[in-house]
Image (tube, grey):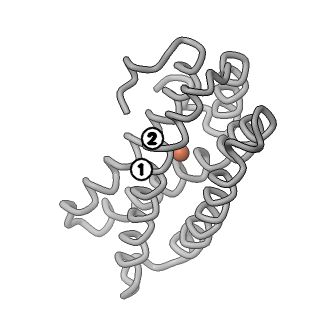
Amino acid sequence: MNKSEIPAAQKAALSLLLDDHRKVKKIFKDFEKEKDVAARQRMVEEACTELTVHTKIEEEKFYPYLRDQDPQAFGELLNEALVEHASAKELITQLQGMDPEDDLYDAKFTVLGEYVNHHVTEEEGELFPKVISKKIDLKDLAQEMESLKQDLVPSAAMS
Ligand SMILES: [Fe+2]
C-alpha cells in the first residue's frame, strides 16, 4: 500500500502503521544477511521491541476503534488479527528469554518474520482498504496512537 493513495481522513493513522510495517520488515530482511552473532541478537531485540509497540497500538487503539465504528464490517478480520498477535507475542516472549546460540533461535525468529509478512499482507491488502472504502475518520485516533507510541518508545518522537 502506498501512502500517497491514502485520503486525508485516514492518512496519519495508517501511515504510522505502514511505517512500522516497513521498519520491521527491513529488520527481518537485514537479519538474513547478517553473520555476526551480536549484531543478529541486537536485530532480534529491536524487532521484538518494535513489534510489541506496534501490537499494543493496534490492540489498544486501532482495532477497538474500528470494531466500535462498524462491528459488522471489521469484527471477523479483527478477531483473526488478535489470534495472530497472540501467536506472535508467544514467539517474542520465547525469543527474549533465549540464548542466541540456541539451535531454535534463528528458526523462531524466521517464523516470527513469516507471521509479520502475513500480518502486513492482511492489513495492507484487506483491512486498510476497507477502512478507506468505509470512510472511517481516523484523524483524532491518529493523535491517540501517536501519543501512545511516544509513551511506549520515548525515542519514537524523534524518528
Ligand atoms: Fe499492523
Expressed as whole percent of the image width and height from the top left, the position of residue 29 reads 26, 54
Q: Quadrant of the N terminus?
A: top left
Looking at the rendered structure, the kind of residue marked 2 is Glu
Expressed as whole percent of the image width and height from the top left, the position of residue 121 reads 41, 50
Figure check: 3 above or below 93: above
Location of mark 2 (residue): 124
Figure check: 40 above or below 13: below
Mark 1–mark 2 CB contact (< 8 Å): yes
Looking at the rendered structure, the kind of residue marked 1 is Thr
Location of mark 1 (residue): 121
Element under label 1? Answer: helix
Q: Is residue 55 left or right of residue 19?
A: right
Q: Is residue 140 left or right of residue 155?
A: right
39 or 74: which is nearer to us? 74
Residue ID at (42%, 61%): 44
Expressed as whole percent of the image width and height from the top left, the position of residue 5 reads 39, 19
